[in-house]
Amino acid sequence: MLTKIEKATYVILAAFFAVSVYFGITDEKFFNDVITTEDGVVEYGTAVFLFLIAALSAYRLYTLGKHKSFTWKLGVLAFVLLFIFGAGEEISWGQRIFGIESSEYFLENNAQKETNLHNLVVGGKKVNKVIFSQLLMVIMVIYLIVTPILYRKKQWVRDLMDRFAVPVVQWHHTIAFLVCTALVSIIPAERKWEIYELAFGVIFLLIFLNPLNKAIFKRS
């Protein structure tokens, strides 16, 4: 059963994707220069949602940590750091917001001359393509499809996920990701991955708010 927040979020996300797919196919210039423009609503929206996940995790660590095991706290802390990193990378750690110039290293080795890691070029290869695309895709498949199946069937997987406070997706989260992936794949516009990143932030926030193993975020 979907919560009211989940229902409302999916409706808004569906409306956003309907508009994005339409303009991504019929008017690539408007899609690239307005909807997904650099430093626009979509990019900053992604950073906000990632930061909200980090904030939620930090709140849980603060309010529940004293009642939980060391591994639980370690897992939650890891998510705090991971999503802060993701939010920071999304907006190049605020360098354009605050008008900070990139250092010489990033000017020479970053594909966009920005202060972030995902656009670094190492050995002629863009880190974003090798790590943040290919590796992340493998991790997402394991997390969204393999893990929830094993969690339901294998006790050791349940113990491992719960011990380290890893939120396990519900099937509607997986379906939402697959639908978003299919829709993004049909958009020819260059900056289509910006809306995919926003969907990532939105759906992951829903996962962290209401995972399959939500009991791990209750005081025991």
Image: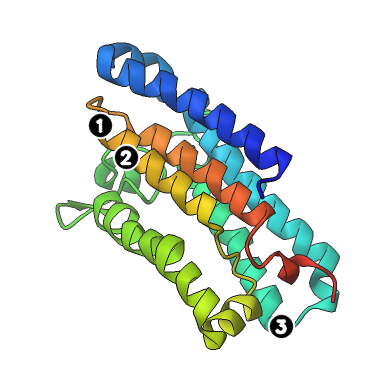
Earlier residue among tags 3 and 1: 3
Q: Residue at x 36, y 61 (%)?
A: 141
Quarter of the image where one finds residue 156:
bottom right
Quarter of the image where one finds residue 101:
top left
The answer to whether any part of residue 103 appears in the image is no
Q: Is residue 218 left or right of residue 188?
A: right
The answer to whether any part of residue 179 appears in the image is yes
| Element at label 1 | loop
| Element at label 2 | helix
Q: Which residue is mark 3?
A: 70
The residue closer to the viewer here, 53 or 84, is: 53
Crowding around mark 1 (Cα neighbors within 10 Å: few <14, some 14 to 19, many 20+) is: few
Q: Residue at x 32, y 45 (%)?
A: 119
Q: Which residue is mark 2?
A: 182
Picture coordinates of residue 165 (x, y %)? 65, 72
Earlier residue among tags 3 and 2: 3
